Image: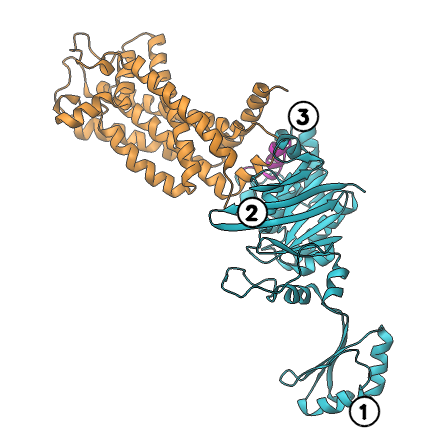
Chain colours: A cyan, B orange
Amino acid sequence: MSDAIVVEGLVKRFGATTALDGVHLTVAEGSVLGLLGPNGAGKTTVVRILTTLLRADAGRVRVAGLDVVEDADAVRASIGLTGQYAAVDEYLTGLENLEMVGRLYRLGKREARARAGELLERFDLTGAADRPAKTYSGGMRRRLDIAASLIARPRILFLDEPTTGLDPRSRLGMWEFIADLADGGTTILLTTQYLEEADRLADRMVVIDRGRVIARGTADDLKAQVGGQRLEFTVTTAAVLPDVLERLRGMAVDEPQVDEQARRLSLPVSGGAEILAEALQRLDGFTPDILDVGLRRPDLDDVFLALTGHAAEETAGDDDRPAQPAATGGMA
Amino acid sequence: MNTLATTLSDSVVITKRNLIKVRRVPDLIVFATLSPIMFVVLFRYVFGGAIGGLPPGISYAEFLLPGIFAQTVVFGSTITGASLADDLQKGLIDRFRSLPMSRSAVLVGRTVADAGLNVISIAVMALTGLVVGWRINSSLGEALAGFLVLLVFAYAISWLMAVVGLLVRTPEVVNNASFIVIFPLTFIANTFVPLETFPSVLRVFAEWNPVSTVTLASRELFGNVPPGTPVPDVWSLQNPVLYTLVWTAVILAVFVPLSVRLYQRTATR
């Protein structure tokens, strides 16, 4: 499979601030790449450079096989962009918005109208097609915005935080639309702060923090980096923790963690559901004291915390934090 | 498609978009025309009786209207800056810049739509003027040329305001900033009173102020300067049409390329 997007050594400075400090990444044709990172990590700057809105200070970017600086217009003709703001004209109706963008993508009048109708249908906006976008809810605007970026059937789609600010129901709906597009063969680069979102939609991920790639791979690769699965118990009173631990002796593959305050025990284990069954068997008689039991795989929040030393949703504004001994960019 | 054809067709799409807004937000037109009507009526009746030094053989209404036209179309052009700043803030410029469209069409479409608004304002003011005693005393061709000079000059100011809008990026600030510059520019001129009473420094400024010459140019073309009025000893006022068109050309030559350049580099922050 060839690469739809190739980014090499991307550097961008804004005055004295280095926003991007040598970013490398590739996105295979027809795949979904999740670009993860906290606020201010440089995700949007990457998207802006890849979509020709911003020029890099150093590095090379090819999108759809074309150089984003030399062949900017040809790049624009093969991409769709949905930015962080729902960029719709609020005085135009949904239909007029889509027709306008279609015309500017050089579709004929009739084709633009037909495509607009199709997309309104697909994004559940047919009923609101003739209402000014001003009257739309946040979720509807976002859908209209994505519909606009799809009007010319782009091969490559850039989605910059497509679900930020959406309520949970709209977010689920948006995930379905994005998954459908990916199934249809569109190459997608998606930025997000939500690890769950990347986990659910992306084939591969690139994690950036302060303008540098700190990890890359599939969700499983990243999780494996942080460690395997754990058995977790929450009990009614910390007093029973030593006894519980005693019963489970020998099952842990690494040092168990005991949190007396949270009355929680965490046991690194290897194996599948049978290990949970075994643990429960060993704990026969303690069941009334056990509030919660689970076999947990690390989620991307754990990954992020382990890689950067701070949670994903935390803002990366505090630069006086000591540098993290994080993994370097050349893993993949 | 070649560049000119794509620029034209994209500009038509954008102009249409901008005019749809005018249709959907009628307040825009109401306020764009209400203040000039107010100016016509206030100046005609409040100051009209007190303003002296007019050339003999002319009513204040006839003197005043071309001045109000000039002031209104120049102010009308400031909409260009505020609207572009608004598009920038809402992320629409990012969207347009990510499309394979002409690099100048957003600006052309904007300025053309705003010129359209100015046509509507002038029409409303002209009708109001006719009610309060303004008359056109020239041929149809000359009168049309009078309107055209006003609109062409205002169109150039639109491009200047486009640069302001793309630099300032906040619609409210564009409005306030342009008010501070444009209000004196349209008052230190022959728009509302004859220049003879101005103190010397202001008078020199007013004589070379293109707002004065665009006013005088349209006054002459509407036949609102009675024959026998002494011609001032200043080149700009002796050749108001030419002087105005030179300004127009210079403003366009500087600010069209500058705003297109800025547009290509700007992005929502």
Question: Do tag 3 and tag 2 residues touch (Cβ < 8 Å)?
Answer: no
Which residue is labeled 2 in the image? A85
Stretch in magenta: A92-102
1 or 3: tag closer to the N-terminus = 3
Q: Is residue A100 left or right of residue B37?
A: right
2 or 1: tag closer to the N-terminus = 2
- Kindly state the secondary structure of the residue where label 1 is placed: loop
Give the number of the disc on residue A108. 3
Query: Picture coordinates of residue A13 (x, y %)?
Result: 52, 46
**Residue kind at label 2, given as amino acid type:** Tyr
User: Count of labels shown?
Assistant: 3
Viewer-nearest of labels 3 and 2? 2
Q: How far apart are labels 2 and 1 at the CA level?
A: 56 Å
In the rendered structure, the residue with mark 1 lies on which chain? A
Q: Residues within 10 Å of mark 1 (few under 14, many from 20)?
A: few
Q: How far apart are labels 1 and 3 at the CA level?
A: 74 Å
In the rendered structure, the residue with mark 3 lies on which chain? A
Which residue is labeled 1 in the image? A285
Figure quadrant of residue B149: top left
